[in-house]
Image: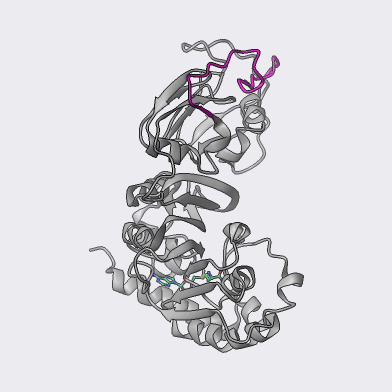
Amino acid sequence: MAMPNDEITQKVSDRYARAASTGEQMCCPTSYDFADLKSFIPEEVLTISYGCGTPAGLKTVAPGETVLDIGSGGGIDCFEASRLVGPSGHVIGIDMTDTMLTIARKNAPVVAANLGYSTSNVEFRKGMADAIPVIDGTVDLIISNCVINLAPDKRKVFRDMFRVAKPGGRFTISDIVADQPVPQYLIQDAEKWGDCLSGALTLTDYLAGLSGAGFLGIHLIKSSPWQVIDGIHFFSVTLTGHKLPTDSPVTAGRYATLRGPFSRVVDERGTIYFRGIPLPITPDIVCLLNQTPLAPHFVLSADPLWLDRADARWTAVYPADAPCLWQGHFAMLAGPFVEAADDDHHLYRRGEPVEICSKTLKVLEADGYAAHFAIINRTGQKVSSDAVICAPNVNGGCC
Ligand SMILES: C[S@@+](CC[C@H](N)C(=O)[O-])C[C@H]1O[C@@H](n2cnc3c(N)ncnc32)[C@H](O)[C@@H]1O
């Protein structure tokens, strides 16, 4: 019989309560500028920072915005948000663990004083990630750092995130994902839940959960390898996405022409675009394609606009005319498209690992591609593969 969700939640909470009271070091390397944070956040909070990414979304914060941090822990990201939204903004941290909440609440007035605020703009509420104690449609930016993997019912979490986001709002979350489904023997191991392993989704399921909840323009900001356990690669990703505004500022349809380097893409609504060929689009799609991760890939125009190969916006990246090596690399498309093709007959589907050779790796490191792929290496050790001269395969491609 599967372990009940309540039991998982209790074990996870106990684990973090214990860690917070001992100041134990946990989870993954992050790239905070601790010297800067130390200037206004007490050491007690910084010691129990258990994230697996930096809150990159906070770079997009504007003064006066409302930020929600799901699983705020000791409050590190809330306090940084507090500084960025300014005294007119509002930050809500939610967490299920009392020990964490006590530390975070105790330090809120200290941080406010260090920032020169007359009163703290941060509040910490006790609550669950899948039942967020926040009113519908009130949050500009949702952040979360290494928490959602710990929630047994992630679809409920994603749905609740969508509920509390304002129309036009966005999320940026860091979390642990796996390159293949986590097996039952790990899922049923309560201790491994607290280690951010048992509850990790595959990237495909994670992205599908977010888009199933209604978010669009879902896109990878950063990925880095973390651990390999029993052949399963766990890595941390930072993802962002949008809840589209309800009242689109655009009323008329337009044409969208895909720029390079992708030769063909499918967006989250199923529309297929071929590079250089204009496609009529409806006002809501105009709104979607205007979002940050998608906008650089399209030329939007009032009249159909064709791009030919001589146009700088057509761009293609071809593999080098040289032998290639198979060294265990796999590429995973991580949005904002659900499907995309390069110029070497590779078809990438969001979240699905595709084995690539050294030449394709080089191609995917090029501008326009690099930001969209998480690359992992599945070899346990360095491989000394022989260079292969690629013969065109059945699709006419290289490898
Ligand atoms: C890995 S720590 C990360 C804390 C914080 N985000 C940081 O970066 O330091 C996970 C935190 O999420 C909280 N948490 C885990 N599962 C949760 C859930 N389902 N609902 C609410 N909080 C949860 C834990 O209590 C803990 O404080």
Q: Is residue 69 above or below residue 331?
A: below
* Image quadrant assignment for residue 369: top right
> In the rendered view, how is the structure colored?
one colour
Residue at 51 percent of width and 51 percent of height: 240
Residue at 30 percent of width and 68 percent of height: 5
Q: Is the magenta stretch mostly helix, strand or loop?
A: loop
Give how far across and how far down residue 27 sits, in percent. Answer: 57, 66
Q: Is residue 385 above or below residue 389?
A: below
Q: Decide whether residue 5 is among the magenta residues.
A: no
* Image quadrant assignment for residue 20: bottom right
- Apparent side of residue 342 relative to residue 362 in the rendered image (left or right): left
The count of marks equals 0
Q: Residue furthest left?
A: 1
Residue in front for this viewpoint, 394 or 240: 240
Give how far across and how far down residue 160 sits, in percent. Answer: 34, 62
Q: In this view, does 388 lie above or below 337?
A: above
Q: Which residue lies furthest to the right in this view?
A: 35
Residue 350 visible within the image: no
Give how far across and how far down residue 389 sits, in percent. Answer: 65, 14
Q: Decide whether residue 317 is among the magenta residues.
A: yes
* Image quadrant assignment for residue 288: top left
Q: In this view, does 35 lie above or below 301?
A: below
Give how far across and how far down residue 142 sits, in percent. Answer: 48, 62
Residue 10 visible within the image: yes
Q: In which quarter of the image is the C terminus?
A: top right
Residue at 38 percent of width and 39 percent of height: 284
Q: In which quarter of the image is the N terminus?
A: bottom left
Q: What stretch is highlighted in magenta?
A: 299-323
